[in-house]
Structures are given as C-alpha cells and as structure tokens.
Image: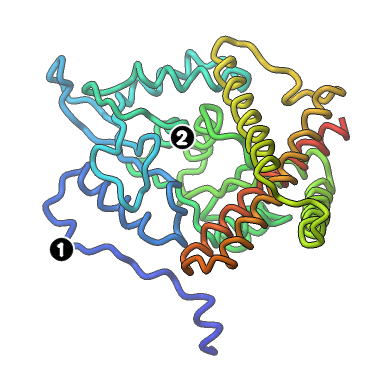
Amino acid sequence: MSATRQGHNALLPSLWDDAAAAGLDEPGLLLYRSNILGADLRVTNFGGGNTSAKVTDKDPLTGANVEVLWVKGSGGDLGSMKRDGFATLYQDKLLGLERAYRGLAHEDEMVALFNHCTFNLNPRAASIDTPLHGFVPHKHVDHVHADAVIAIAASENAEKLTKEIFGGKLGFLPWQRPGFDLGLKLGRMARENPALEGVVLGGISAIFEQRYPGIAIQAIGATFAVTLVMLTLYRTRVIRVTERLRAVVMGAMFGIVLLYVGAWILSFFHFAVPFINGGGPLGIGFSILVVGVAAFMLLLDFDMIEQGVAQGAPQYMEWYGAFGLMVTLVWMYVEMLRLMAKLRE
C-alpha cells in the first residue's frame, strides 16, 4: 500500500491519556473527554459540538440518588471549556417533557422548559441540543462536527454513502433543525437499533433536495453567479464601497437579524411571522431582499480583504477575511435554497 493511500486511511491519533484520566470523577472524565474532542478542529469546529454523561448524584432536597444529565451548556468551546460550562438537569424531568411537547410548530417553547429540569440550581443554561443527549439511551453521548463526516452528510447520496462506508455501524437521519423533535427521533433510532455506534445527520441541502429535486445544484449555481457578478462590479469599480454604503448594508443586515430574532421570540407566544417562511408574494419578496443584502455583504468582504492586503495586515488576518467571506457565501446559499423553494411552491 502506498504512503498516500495509507495517509487517506489513517485514523486520527487518540489523545486520551490513562494517567491524566486516573482519579477523575464522572464529571471530570466528561470534561477531559470534551476538551480532547474540541482540541482537534478536524473533529469539531470552534464553538461547535456538545458532549454529555448521565451521572448518579444525590438530590440536594431529598438525599436520594437520582440520574443527572451533565451536558455542555449554551456558549463556550469544547476545547477550552471548564467544569462550570456544563448544564445539569434531572434526567427524569427532562424525559417527562415529552408529555408537554406539542409538535414541530412549538419547538421554541421547549427550550424555556429546560429551566424547570435544572439540578442543584445550576445557572448554566441548557442548549437547544439538550434533548438529543437526554433521549439517546446511552450513558455517554458526543455530538461533533467531524470534517470527514460532514463531507459525507453534504453529499448527494449521503444515506447510501453512510451505509457503504460505515457498514451499518452508523445510522442516518435527514437534516432537520436541532430541537426536541430531533432528540425524540435520535432516541427512537437508538432504541430500535441498539447495535448502532452513532448517527449521521444529513446536510440541509439533502432535505431540500428530497422535497425539490435539483434545487441544491440550482442554488449553488445561483450563489456562484451572484458572487461572480458582485466581484466583477467590485473589481471594475462600478460599485465602490463607501462609508455610506457600508453603513446601509450593515444596517440592513442587522435589521434582518433582529427580525429573525423577533420572530423567534414571538414563537414562544404562538405567533408566527408569515412572510419569513411563507411562499406567497410577500415571502418571495422578503427572500429576494435578504439575498440582495447578502450580495452587498460580499462587497464588504472583498473590500476588507483588499484593504488588509494594501495595509500590510499580519498573516493571521487572512483567516478572518476568509472566514467572513465563507459565512456570507453560506448565508447566501441557504437563502437561495429558501427563495427557490418558495418559487417552486
């Protein structure tokens, strides 16, 4: 076997040290495991992923032994988090929330109910991924964003590839928004298939592709075309990035963000903003507006990169420029998917 071939098949080296782990209690072992998983960006991106352990502890009120879910809370990074970065919840109370769940249209209201499951007055807020860890019937659960697995999940035949590559050791679920329903589905899959070692969650493109065949390649093509047009307009100075333009574009972007946040808050009161997701003329117009703002954000990204080069910015700033451009491109691609889905409806 050639060296190149060996390199492609090599496993990532294990960073676990038995000596370092010796003597740690269950939460300490969870923290140690979490820091190791977060130390390699090929395993999970900065600020992403979450881990958990179901630990037996004494109830501070009754003194009885109870099962407590220790799970990475909102915010923070796996690689650098400390012990206080974990939320702690009564496992039985968390499972009991299934009786209060009213379906996908009421996902957001469930996050507020996690507070009623808090163990020992822990102030760390539980994240939206908490149900995933609670309903999967295993003591230890790790949710990561491994580069290699993302490449599979984002492929056209993601489910087929998952079966072929992992030989049935990993299950597959189409992408859906993180939340209570996803936790229920993962828990059900784990119980019905006890031999599974994990589950691959499909990419957002896959879920759109299932409903609207061919939409992903169309959205990619449209995103590429808009990017090329905006780059041409920028390079030829047909559009110049002035302070006024920058202020208008940034204001529009923050306005869209506030609108999305406001819609999320209103969902707690069972009120939906129809034009955000609706397929009518207003909904289509809103998506066109968002795509337009994303397109002008590309101009700001191009200008930041060009100004950085002209001013001799340090080399590490390359990462910031590339990351900013990537975020804008991903945003535009997702909005293109939404727009094209609305047009097809």
**Colour mapping used in the image:** rainbow
Q: At which x and y percent is residue 295?
A: 75, 46
Q: CA distance from mark 2 to mark 1?
A: 31 Å
Q: Nearer the viewer, residue 127 or 167?
A: 127
Q: Which mark is residue 19?
A: 1
In this rendering, the count of numbered labels is 2
Q: Nearer the viewer, residue 112 or 190?
A: 112
- Do callouts 2 and 1 mark residues in contact (Cβ within 8 Å)? no
Question: Residue 106, located in which quarter of the rendered image?
Answer: top right
Image position of 219 (left or right of 268): right
Whichever of callouts 2 and 1 sits on the residue coming sooner in the sequence is: 1
Graded by Cα atoms within 10 Å as few (under 14), some (14 to 19) or many (20 or more), the crowding at tag 1 reads: few
Graded by Cα atoms within 10 Å as few (under 14), some (14 to 19) or many (20 or more), the crowding at tag 2 reads: many
The three-letter amino acid code for the residue at tag 1 is: Ala
Q: Nearer the viewer, residue 49 or 123?
A: 123
Image position of 287 (left or right of 121): right
Secondary element type, mark 1: helix
Residue found at x 61% / y 43%: 173
Residue found at x 59% / y 26%: 258
Q: At which x and y percent is residue 324?
A: 58, 52
Q: Nearer the viewer, residue 269 or 248?
A: 248
Q: Residue furthest front?
A: 243
Secondary element type, mark 2: loop
The three-letter amino acid code for the residue at tag 2 is: Asp
Residue found at x 42% / y 32%: 127
Q: At which x and y percent is residue 73?
A: 36, 35
Residue found at x 45% / y 47%: 48
Q: Which mark is residue 277?
A: none
Q: At which x and y percent is residue 41?
A: 44, 60
Q: Which quadrant is home to the C terminus?
A: top right
Q: Which residue is mark 2?
A: 129
Above or below 79: residue 68: above
